[in-house]
Amino acid sequence: MTKLEGGTGMYGKRQLRKLLTVGVFLFLFFTVAFGDLMEDITNIVKGISPEIHGMYNALSLNMWNASLIYEDSKLAIGLRLHDENTRSESYKLGFITMKRPVDKSYFNFMAFVGQVHGVALTIGYESYSIPVTGFEKTYYISTNQVLQSEYSKTWLSLPSIPLGETIIGPFALNYEGFSLSKLGNEEPKIEINLKRGYALIDTLPLSFVQIGGIYSFGMFLFADKSLEQGAIVNLGWDFDEGRLVGVLGGRLFIDFQDFRFFFATFGTYIPSSQNVKYGVWFRFLSPISGDLIIQNNVAYFKLRFSE
């Protein structure tokens, strides 16, 4: 009995070892296969280059030169024409010739027909030399509505300037702004107007934030040297309500594995009012790139796979 039980125990251990070996092998096999499958799917999706663009009451899914438009429960099919021109400069680095992108200009035109019809035009420009500047403007015209959006950015850094026996500076500025408006006399007015500017004069960090009809100025705290991250404590005036308001918020870079983005949020502080006004801005870098902007329950987004 003892030997038989011992033999059975050894047999069971050998079987268990085999099962574990096979299980580990299958796990690794399916993990690698699934990983390769997901990588293949990602490469295919990137090859298709999908882009999703959402403005007020309108959504477009763009692939290659075609688009599917959904607006106010109506569908349409669109054809796109787009072009991009990147200009570079060459310079010598030892015996190697290097190229550096200087600026980029682009446009995107779309005409769509179906249950709703219209046109959309986007033009943009980016400069990569200091000062870094850029703008993008979109006109969306359909049978139901006329929308206009505008994006602009500026980043510059200047050295200290001698002025007599004193020195002023150095100076740095990081500005970014977005606006979306629905043209016409319909009520309520639909718009996003979110702008933020951070400046560093010597060691004095300053901030400017606009949320709709609120203009505020204050301090940019815990700022990094690029002025991309930090907290704001501002005091401003609400021109819509005619009152003094406080504005709190900030901008933070988040890097979680391959997912990288900036998150910015700003909101009013009014102890005696429940009418809180706010703005939220996601700037995605990878694996998708683009923006998601929300202001007072009105949203805009433009997302695509990063290159």
Image (cartoon, rainbow, N blue to C red):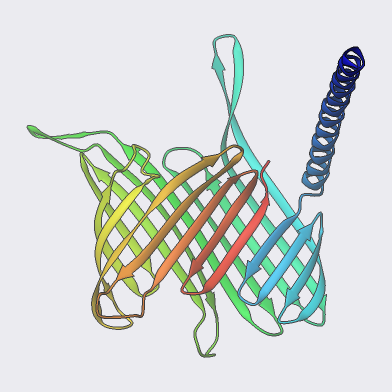
Q: Residue at x 32, y 69 (%)?
A: 268
In percent of width and height, residue 3 lies at 90, 12
Q: Residue at x 28, y 50 (%)?
A: 220
Q: Residue at x 65, y 72 (%)?
A: 140
Quadrant position of the C terminus in the picture: top right
Q: Would you place residue 222 above or below residue 135 in this image?
A: above
Q: Looking at the image, which residue sits at the far left? A: 165
Q: Would you place residue 188 above or below residue 86 in this image?
A: below
Q: Would you place residue 157 above or below residue 240 in this image?
A: above
**Along the line of sight, the residue nearer the viewer: 36 or 22:** 22
Q: Quadrant of residue 7?
A: top right
Q: Looking at the image, which residue sits at the far top? A: 95
In percent of width and height, residue 34 lies at 83, 37
Left or right of 159? Residue 89 is: right
Q: Looking at the image, which residue sits at the far front? A: 1
Q: Quadrant of residue 302?
A: bottom right
Quadrant position of the N terminus in the picture: top right
- Count of numbered labels shown in the rendering: 0
Left or right of 17? Residue 281 is: left
Q: Quadrant of residue 88?
A: top right
In percent of width and height, residue 36 lies at 83, 34
In percent of width and height, residue 167 lies at 14, 34
Left or right of 29? Residue 117 is: left
**Along the line of sight, the residue nearer the viewer: 115 or 29:** 29
